[in-house]
Each structure stands twice: as C-alpha cells, then as structure tokens.
Amino acid sequence: MDLKEIQNLIKFVSNSGVAEVKLEMDNVKITIRTTVEGSTPEITYVQTPAVAPALPQPATQIPVSTPAAPATPAAPAAPAADDTSKYITVKSPIIGTFYRKPAPDKPMFVEVGSTIAKGDVLCVIEAMKLFNEIESEVAGKIVKILVDDSSPVEFDQPLFLVDPS
C-alpha cells in the first residue's frame, strides 16, 4: 500500500463518519480512528511480519556502539580490560526506548559516580507506550552509562557498568 492510497483511505474514513476502520493486508495492519466529527483521525500502522526482519537492523547498531567502547580505553588497553571484568553489567530486559529520567522536567535517575542500592530505579524503558522502571539487582557505584538518553535499546543490550565493591 503506498502513501497515496493511505491518504485516500484517511479522507474516506474522515468523510464517512465511522468511528474506527481496521485494515489488514499481507504484512501491513492499519487502524484509523476518528474521535469527533471534523477532527483529524488518529492512525496506527503496524507491520507485523516486517518487525521480525527489522529487529536485526537495530542489532546492527549494537556493533556500532561496541566500537565506541574500545575507543575509550585506547590508551590504557590492558588495565581497562581488567577493570571491566570486575564490573557488573546491567542489561536491558526488554526492547524499547531508554530514558534516564522519569519525565523531561525531572532529574536523572542515576549519574556516573552515583551509589545505588538493590532495587533502586536506574532508568525507564518505554515499550509500546508503557514505561517500565528498570531496577538495580546489585548494590554498588555507577561506573559508566553505556546508552544515550532517548535511544532505542535491544533485549540484553548493556546499559550500565556497576562497581559492586
């Protein structure tokens, strides 16, 4: 389905007066909802089979962020390898968007150097409009934050390095 067909469908739904239209074709699901007559319709696109092939695409981003890690310990290569082995890596339990603060006007959950206890909230990950608080499973000190704020993360992607000592 191309953009022109979708635009025509939106116009048709807006003019018809129906509250909701769902359309499924091959690998595309489209839901168009109108709330008040004359208002702009709300459109939801879901491509179910395309999601599985699209997942390896962000997995390609993981190696992009992996070279960033070796670039930092370029000068002290051997000590950095020893240092990272004593740290505990906090990984993402879900796929979603990583946020370091609970709201745009609120302070960050943790910073580098913050001391954390078991159960402290480290970040939130938004998945399907749900904000999931990621709690620490260890006590220690945040050594490094491996993901930028508002970045997409994959399942099991490293988020933080924690020094448990």
Image: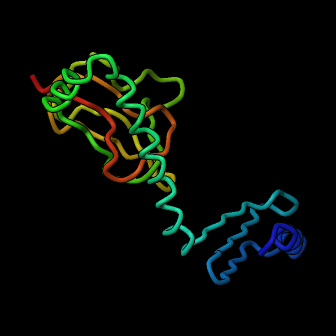
- Residue shown at the point (67%, 83%) measured from the top left: 25
> Residue 99: percent from the left, percent from the top?
45, 36
Q: Split into 4 quadrants, where in the image is the N terminus?
A: bottom right
Along the horizontal axis of the image, is 128 left or right of 124?
right
Up the image or down, 122 lies above or below 128; here it is above
Residue sitting at the far left:
165
Which residue does the image show at 68% across and 72% down from the upper left? Answer: 30
Query: Which residue is painted at 39% across and 39% down in the image?
Result: 66
Q: Quadrant of residue 15?
A: bottom right
Quarter of the image for residue 34 reads: bottom right
How many numbered circles are shown? 0
Whole-percent x and y of residue 96?
45, 50
Quadrant, the C terminus? top left
Q: Nearer the viewer, residue 55 or 130?
A: 55
Q: Is residue 29 above or below residue 164?
A: below
Q: Position of residue 48 (x, y in %)?
A: 55, 73
Residue 157, image x, y percentages = 34, 46
Residue 27 horizontal side relative to residue 93, left or right: right
Q: Nearer the viewer, residue 44 or 68?
A: 68
Which of the two residues, 41 or 70, is positioned nearer the viewer here?
Answer: 70
**Residue 10 in which image quadrant:** bottom right
